[in-house]
Image: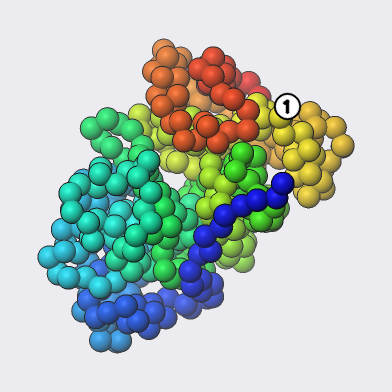
Amino acid sequence: MLKFIRHNPRKIIFEKGSLELVGREAARFGRRSLIVCGRTFARKYGFLSKLEKTLSSEGLEVYIFDKVEPNPSLETVESGSKLVKANNIDVIVAFGGGSALDAAKGISLLGVKEGSIRDYLYPYIVEEDTIPLIAIPTTCGTGSEVTKYAVLTDTQLRRKCVLVGPGIVPLVSILDPVVLEVLPPNLTAYTSFDALSHAIEAYLSKLSTPISDLFSVESVKIITNHMIGGYKGSLEDKTWLFYASHLAGLAINIAGTIMVHGLGYYLTTHHNIHHGLANAMLLPYAIEFNTPVAEEKIVNLAEALGVSSGDPLEDARRLINIILKLRKDVGIPLKLSDLGVREDELELMVSIAMKYERNLKNNPRAVSASDVRDIYKKALRGAI
């Protein structure tokens, strides 16, 4: 029986030049603003000064927290929240990739809470209001501007952890394609693969719905058509990838992610492999593994891409080949071993992957430690 619950995202502005609207949007929430961003990008390319200018022009006081690292730590969130409390911040403006946006979500939550951010990690569900958050993504991936998730890193345990709940969904998201002009080819590719993985994982998820499937399929179609053009520098193609990432974010906000994320986190926490690259390396194996329990969906996705034979196994092969060709065309290697991952790490990899129960339980096919081991073995050799 058809059944679902959907939290609609808030105000979305998708327009070239829309960075100029940040001050106007922020002024609706108060007079004291905090910009949360990474350590170099926003300042290097002049975006930080633009944000300061548009906020100041609307009469807002501007504070800056530019300490967010890739794969933001719990400690970074704690540090940022202290700045919020010390200055009675009314509104947070997050500018950057998924790391900056996710850190800002944590800061917005802890800004109204006592204790440690650890107290609010999943399985805690953030239902309550947080500091109003305006999200400005700067990559073709994550979709964090519309999701109820914030992925953080526990550096002590070398483990990914997550905040979950509608309370951390940004109240306003501003997507200005101008920010993509300076996105380099490798990050265009990696973040696009992150979005592609989001779309396909949500599509295969146990929690998928007809609505999330609409977002997922459209996202996959756009990404497969525009990734190479975006990688080569076309702003038109990057703009479409930006939109596809947004759609994929809407999809995972409903359906979540599956085994690709669960298996990929080890690669990031233990080898510092970009999250999108980790997903790119594992996505084909997830399609192969899940096809026996998702035959109709595989055929439907292949039909949407114009490559269906009508046979699920053949269509899965064709989908995998599309992904492998995209990987090759953007310079992503075939084997995990090419990224420095070693065979003697295998048991540790399996042990850690099995701890990401939230992702594995969402997988359409039950995942055992033996299954994870087999997938990692194949990925190490590039056997796909």
The quarter of the rendered structure image containing the C terminus is top right
Badge 1 density bin: few <14, some 14–19, many ≥20, Cα 10 Å: some
Which residue corresponds to the image point at 17% horizontal and 49% vertical from the top-left? Answer: 115
- Outermost left residue: 86
Indicate the quadrant where residue 52 lies: bottom left
Which residue corresponds to the image point at 49% horizontal and 72% vertical from the top-left? Answer: 11
Q: Is residue 235 above or below residue 303?
A: below
Observer-nearest residue: 128 or 179? 128
Indicate the quadrant where residue 291 lies: top right
Which residue corresponds to the image point at 42% horizontal and 60% vertical from the top-left? Answer: 169
Which residue corresponds to the image point at 79% horizontal and 44% vertical from the top-left? Answer: 300
- In the picture, measured across the screen, residue 382 lies left or right of residue 340, that is right
Q: Is residue 381 above or below residue 225?
A: above
**Mark 1: which secondary structure?**
helix
Q: Position of residue 133 (x, y in %)?
A: 35, 67
Circle 1 residue = 292
Q: Position of residue 53 (x, y in %)?
A: 30, 81
Indicate the quadrant where residue 206 lies: top right
Q: Position of residue 3 (x, y in %)?
A: 65, 51
Callout 1 amino acid: Pro
Q: Position of residue 33 (x, y in %)?
A: 25, 73
Q: Is residue 338 above or below residue 280?
A: above
